[in-house]
Amino acid sequence: MSNPFATAPVLTAAPQDLSGLNTLGLVSMAQACVTLDDVAQLPSLSELAAGHASLLVLGGGSNLVLPEAVPGLVARVALRGVRLLRAQPDAWLVEAAGGETWHGFVAECVRQGWDGLENLALIPGTVGAAPVQNIGAYGVELADRFHSLTAWDVRAGRYVEMTAADCRFAYRDSVFKHEPPGGWVIVAVRLRLPRPWRPVLAYPDLQRHPGLVAGEPTARAIFDAVCEIRRAKLPDPAVTGNAGSFFKNPIVAAAQRDALLERFPGLVSYAQPDGRFKLAAGWLIDQCGWKGRQLGAAGVHDRQALVLVNRGGATAADIMALARAIQDAVMDRYGVALEPEPVVV
């Protein structure tokens, strides 16, 4: 990737209200913030970050719990661009810049006929954040389609190319979640979309959707169905502040799952390839009586117990107090630990 560093603009940090830049809508203020909309600015970012105690790389703000005052430097990634790199007989190879919205990218792929991402429609956030979380939904994970990415090593001031092995993907996890914060800016992500395309319809919600039960489903039909299902289940962050699913579905040993099933016959679980079982965290929370409840300005969504919402004016402390109360309730009743999905700054 060529970059005209010789004429690179110098970034200047300024205070920034982040309350409207995180999907939870938490009251938050950055002491120093820059917007990165050109790769030529990357060297300047490295120089600027060296003078701050910490760096927070901010995409769509969809998987973050921000404090009222964010210390150090905040870098908003606004890099744009989507392109087809290669049309191979067995796959499309597509690339998107890190600042593209994930859903916008998926929609563009469906429009172009680059099928294979439709199950991941309407997931909030940016393309650059997708590998960090190894996002997934309705039977597909980013890792299933991942080819490689280009990242900027902020501390070393250089580009790094990373494969799937380098990223160490796991369930809602990657190497980036185990590195010191602010070390990387994901500049571009490349995905390999297999040809011929085959629909992924393992989830019951898709199998019984009216638009998919008759005939051969198309990628567009699956995209539309996923959008409809997600809108029915999940609140719109523009209306009700939320970060999507707040807890990971816990994975337990078969023996623990069997013991729980004896005590709780309605337990919802899914067999994993390694013999363990994934438990439905939303079911656990619902059975503990938390769906629709509120604690201060933070609450649990009334249709999806996995989603914590901002009822108005909530802070990170409010959200985390509610999260801890839910974790305690699930642990007391089921002996199962719930792990938050969002990054808590």
Image (cartoon, rainbow, N blue to C red):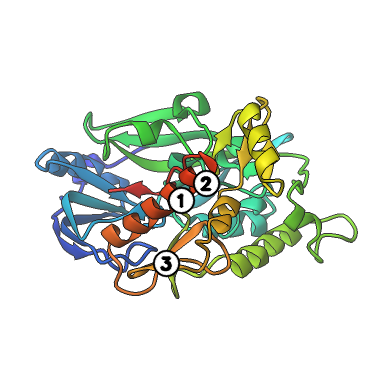
Label 1 packing within 10 angstroms: few (<14), some (14-19), many (20+): many
Identify the image quadrant of residue 34.
Answer: bottom left
* Closer to the eye: label 3 or 2: 2
197 w.r.t. 313: above or below: above
The residue located at (62%, 53%) in the rendering is 109
Residue tagged by mark 2? 333
Label placed on residue 329: 1
The residue located at (76%, 53%) in the rendering is 204
Q: Mark 3: which amino acid?
A: Gly
Q: Position of residue 116 (x, y in %)?
A: 68, 46
The residue located at (56%, 48%) in the rendering is 281
Q: Is residue 6 visible?
A: no
Circle 1: element type: helix
Label placed on residue 299: 3
- Is residue 238 or residue 243 the one in the foreground? 243
Circle 3: element type: strand
Q: Mark 2: which amino acid?
A: Arg
Q: Position of residue 183 (x, y in %)?
A: 27, 35
Label placed on residue 16: none
Circle 2: element type: helix
* Nearer-N-terminus badge (1/3): 3
* Closer to the eye: label 1 or 3: 1
95 w.r.t. 61: above or below: above
